[in-house]
């Protein structure tokens, strides 16, 4: 598969928008605004139920099935971003 520069720019723009949305929703749900992508979600007060609420806030199409095994691997803000980026893809 080949990618053009335009396609790569679109992917980077999408990832940037997703990162901004993740930061906004985490801030809204936790009240925290200062953290990095390596910050553990538990340090922000995010438990499993709150994580599901954050994902529901971020995912427009709630018909996605969330794999609990993959969700259990989400430990940091970066992990959440990666999980959301892969949502809807097969295992």
Image: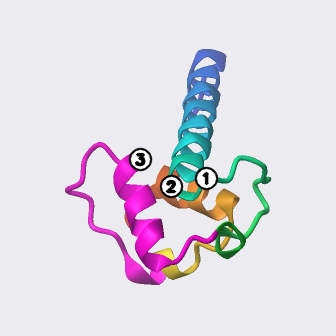
> Residue extending furthest front?
31
Element at label 2: helix
| Left or right: 76, with 48 as reference point | right
Could you give the CA–CA distance between mark 2 and mark 3, rounded to whole angstroms?
Answer: 12 Å
The residue lying toward the viewer, choosing from 16 and 46, is: 46
Q: Are marks 3 and 1 in contact (CB under 8 Å)?
A: no
Which comes sooner in the sequence, label 3 or label 1? 1
Q: Quadrant of residue 6?
A: top right
Q: In the rendered view of the protein, which quadrant contains the N terminus?
A: top right
Answer few, some or many: residues within 10 Å of disc 2's Cα (few below 14, many 20 plus, some between 14 and 19).
some
Please say whether residue 20 is visible from this viewpoint: yes
Q: Which mark is residue 29?
A: 2
> Residue extending furthest top?
6
Q: Which residue is mark 3?
A: 58
Q: Which residues are magenta?
A: 45-70
Element at label 3: helix
Residue occupying image coordinates x 26% and y 59%: 64
- Residue 35: x %, y % from top left: 78, 53
Q: Which mark is residue 31?
A: 1
């Amino acid at each position: 598969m080949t990618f053009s520069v335009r396609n790569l720019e679109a992917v980077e723009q999408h990832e940037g928008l997703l990162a901004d949305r993740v930061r906004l929703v985490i801030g809204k749900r936790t009240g925290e605004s200062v953290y990095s992508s390596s910050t553990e979600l538990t340090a922000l007060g995010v438990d499993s139920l709150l994580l599901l609420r954050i994902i529901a806030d971020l995912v427009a199409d709630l018909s996605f099935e969330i794999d609990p095994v993959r969700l259990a691997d989400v430990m940091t803000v970066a992990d959440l971003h990666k999980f959301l980026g892969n949502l809807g893809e097969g295992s």
